[in-house]
């Protein structure tokens, strides 16, 4: 047990950054599950400064005698105006909260007014470094990360792949890096007969391929559209797209020009129950993303007994291992061939379903929390 204070409690601080810049997402879930699983630890106190936010995760429900959450409902969306207001509020609050043993930053910087003993940083990915063309602020983010990593006493990487990238882009001593995989949060049981899954164009009887999440830039949604069109599967299958908002004018034009208007259906925004049913009913989940620091959607699909086809890149082979099908180059012809051969491989589909259900069990948030707490202790006791 850490005994840096008279009461033997380690004080841990998490800041507002993720809640200022997003209302939902993998980093928010990671922090929620981390704190939820740390609650059982007897030798810690946690303070979470969410500030103005509209997070979909129920962080205030985590409060108990050892966890304090500073949270106020925001009346406007995430972004830099909310960030600036939270920065101002936190600069005041942090000054009266005293010194923390551990300050754990989840995003791009360490707030300068937080008094701390040790600084821990979670490194998620090097997407801004590898694909700057997809981000207007890539150089700004990289600059902030470089300063943060230089300050950090320990850097937690969410995969071995993300650690390799970190070491290749930044001058960091490997001994202060640690790989701690995310856990997996099961989806709720799906609601039977959810009408949002039924396509508006009446093609109800066709089985479907599934795409989930953001469609921007490196996620390679246009590649999937081209491959689906070239595969000749349209007519025997449809493509169901869940999340990511309404189709852009460019996406809609591409769907039309490829002759897919009758075979592509969209649910712009879906709750977890609808998402679970979408995975459960899919013939194949396709994840053509060019890069992932960890990648939750393939695990979500596996947990719903859905076979998975992913691009063999970054952390995806590490996370999915032999429980997924792969394609090897981001080329529409190759992906088209992979779609056809995968769907034709009935024994392989059955095997991957079973391997996927077992693979998901390896990712446990309680293990993530224990490993993180071990890093905290090692820093303070060294």
Image (cartoon, grey):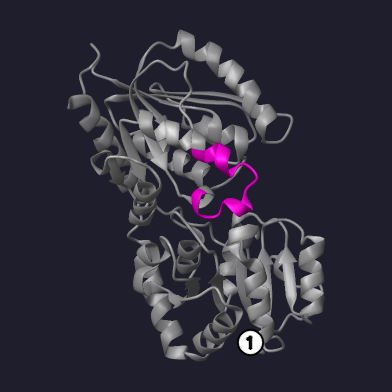
Residue 5 appears in the figure: yes
Q: To which residue does mark 1 refer?
A: 231
- 261 within the magenta span: no
Q: Nearer the viewer, residue 37 or 107?
A: 107
Q: Is residue 139 magenta?
A: yes
Residue 64's image quarter? Answer: top left
The stretch in magenta equals 129-142
Residues packed near mark 1 inside 10 Å, few (<14), some (14 to 19) or many (20 plus)? some
For the stretch drawn in magenta, the main secondary structure is helix
Q: Is residue 306 visible?
A: no
- Locate the C terminus by quadrant: top left
Q: Is residue 313 above or below residue 73?
A: below
Residue visible at 63% across and 58% down?
217
Decide if residue 377 is on the left or right side of residue 166.
Answer: left
Q: Residue at x 67, y 69 (%)?
A: 222
Horizontal placement of 86 versus 378: left or right?
A: right
Q: Residue at x 50, y 85 (%)?
A: 342
Percent x, y of residue 61? 51, 32
Residue drawn at point x = 80 percent, y = 68 percent: 252
């Amino acid at each position: 047990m850490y005994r840096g204070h008279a009461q033997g409690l380690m004080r841990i601080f998490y800041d507002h950054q993720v809640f200022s810049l997003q209302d939902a997402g993998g980093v928010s879930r990671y922090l929620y599950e981390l704190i939820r699983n740390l609650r059982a630890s007897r030798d810690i106190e946690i303070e979470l400064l969410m500030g103005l936010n509209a997070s979909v995760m129920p962080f205030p429900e985590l409060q108990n005698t050892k966890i304090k959450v500073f949270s106020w409902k925001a009346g406007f969306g995430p972004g830099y105006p909310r960030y600036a207001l939270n920065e101002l509020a936190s600069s005041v609050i942090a000054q009266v909260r005293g010194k923390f043993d551990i300050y754990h930053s989840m995003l791009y910087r360490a707030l300068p007014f937080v008094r701390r003993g040790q600084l821990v940083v979670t490194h998620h990915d090097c997407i801004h470094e590898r694909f700057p063309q997809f981000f207007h602020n890539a150089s700004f983010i990289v600059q902030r990360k470089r300063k943060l990593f230089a300050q950090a006493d320990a850097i937690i990487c969410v995969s071995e792949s993300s650690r390799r990238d970190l070491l290749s882009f930044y001058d960091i001593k490997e001994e202060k890096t640690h790989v701690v995989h995310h856990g997996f949060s099961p989806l709720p049981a799906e609601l039977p007969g959810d009408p949002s899954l039924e396509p508006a164009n009446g093609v109800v009887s066709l089985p479907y391929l599934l795409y989930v999440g953001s469609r921007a830039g490196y996620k390679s949604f246009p590649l999937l559209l081209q491959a689906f069109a070239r595969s000749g599967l349209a007519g025997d299958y449809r493509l169901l797209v869940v999340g990511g908002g309404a189709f852009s004018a460019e996406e809609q034009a591409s769907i039309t020009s490829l002759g897919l208007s009758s075979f592509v259906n969209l649910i712009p925004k879906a709750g977890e129950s609808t998402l679970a049913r979408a995975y459960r009913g899919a013939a194949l989940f396709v994840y053509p993303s060019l890069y992932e620091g960890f990648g939750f959607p393939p695990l979500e699909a596996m947990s719903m007994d859905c076979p998975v086809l992913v691009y063999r890149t970054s952390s995806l082979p590490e996370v999915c291992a032999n429980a997924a099908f792969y394609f090897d180059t981001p080329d529409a012809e190759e992906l088209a061939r992979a779609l056809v051969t995968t769907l034709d491989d009935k024994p392989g589909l059955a095997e991957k379903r079973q391997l996927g259900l077992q693979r998901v069990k390896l990712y446990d948030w309680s293990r993530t929390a224990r490993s993180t707490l071990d890093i905290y202790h090692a820093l303070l006791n060294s």
